[in-house]
Amino acid sequence: MSRAFVNEELTAAQADQPVERQISAQPNYVTPQGLSELQAKVAFLQTRHNQQSALGDQADPQQLADIERDLRYFNQRLQSAQVVPQATSRSKVQIGSRVIFADEHGTEQCVQLVGEDQADVAKGLINWGSPLGRALLGTQLGDEVLWQRPAGDQLIEVIRIDPA
């Protein structure tokens, strides 16, 4: 291609724009706590945006673009949020339930099923749409289910279900 057809200014401007965050295709179910966290995240980002905008020409354009991208994403997530009722069952796993399960070796794990934006594996908060979340959702106390993992399928047993 001839260099005559390349708009270098446009190419340089596009390189500075952050890549948009992808919106999940699954329903945006959130716990009441997850909704509060989304609202807090939007408020935080709006404050940061206002602070950067107030700097005028001294604002970092890359940082401002990143904040605007995140603000678009979290505003959209907040608008699409479908709050699920507080989990109350001790016999059936729901979004919001805290679940203790054991694997084939008797090793126990405790997780809580939450919405996508609230998920944090290090804290035991598992996205309801993840392979583990899908395996557990709707199960009952004592059920054995197949957890289809990338590392290989594993049979797990639901030992305890606590409302959040």
Image (cartoon, grey):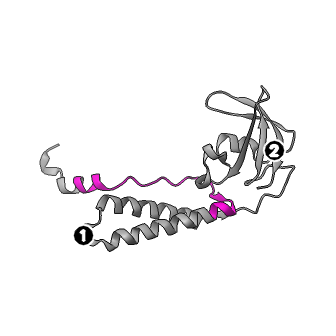
The residue pinned by badge 1 equals 57
At which x and y percent is residue 108?
A: 76, 35
Q: Is residue 81 left or right of residue 164?
A: left
Whether residue 81 is visible here, answered yes or no, is: no
The residue pinned by badge 2 equals 139
Q: Is residue 126 left or right of residue 5?
A: right
User: Residue 118 versus residue 12: which sits nearer the camera?
Assistant: 118
At which x and y percent is residue 31?
A: 69, 60
Q: Secondary structure at mark 1?
A: helix
Q: In the rendered image of this protein, does residue 66 appear above or below residue 136?
A: below
CA separation, marks 2 and 1? Answer: 56 Å
User: Residue 160 versus residue 141: which sits nearer the camera?
Assistant: 160
Q: Is residue 15 left or right of residue 107?
A: left
Q: Is residue 26 magenta?
A: yes
Q: Amino acid at mark 2?
A: Thr
Position of the N terminus, as image quadrant, is top left
Q: Nearer the viewer, mark 2 or mark 1?
A: 1
Crowd tier of the residue under label 2, counting other residues whose Cα lies within 10 Å: few below 14, some 14–19, many 20 or above? some
Q: In the rendered image of this protein, does residue 25 appear above or below residue 141?
A: below
At which x and y percent is residue 138?
A: 79, 48
Q: What's the residue at 84%, 55% (across, down)? A: 89
User: Residue 129 versus residue 88: which sits nearer the camera?
Assistant: 88
Q: Earlier in the sequence, mark 2 or mark 1?
A: 1
- Residue 20 lies in quadrant: bottom left
Q: Which residues are magenta?
A: 12-35
Q: Is residue 62 magenta?
A: no
Q: What's the residue at 69%, 40% (across, down)? A: 132
Q: What's the residue at 78%, 38% (across, down)? A: 101
Q: Secondary structure at mark 2?
A: loop
Q: Amino acid at mark 1?
A: Asp
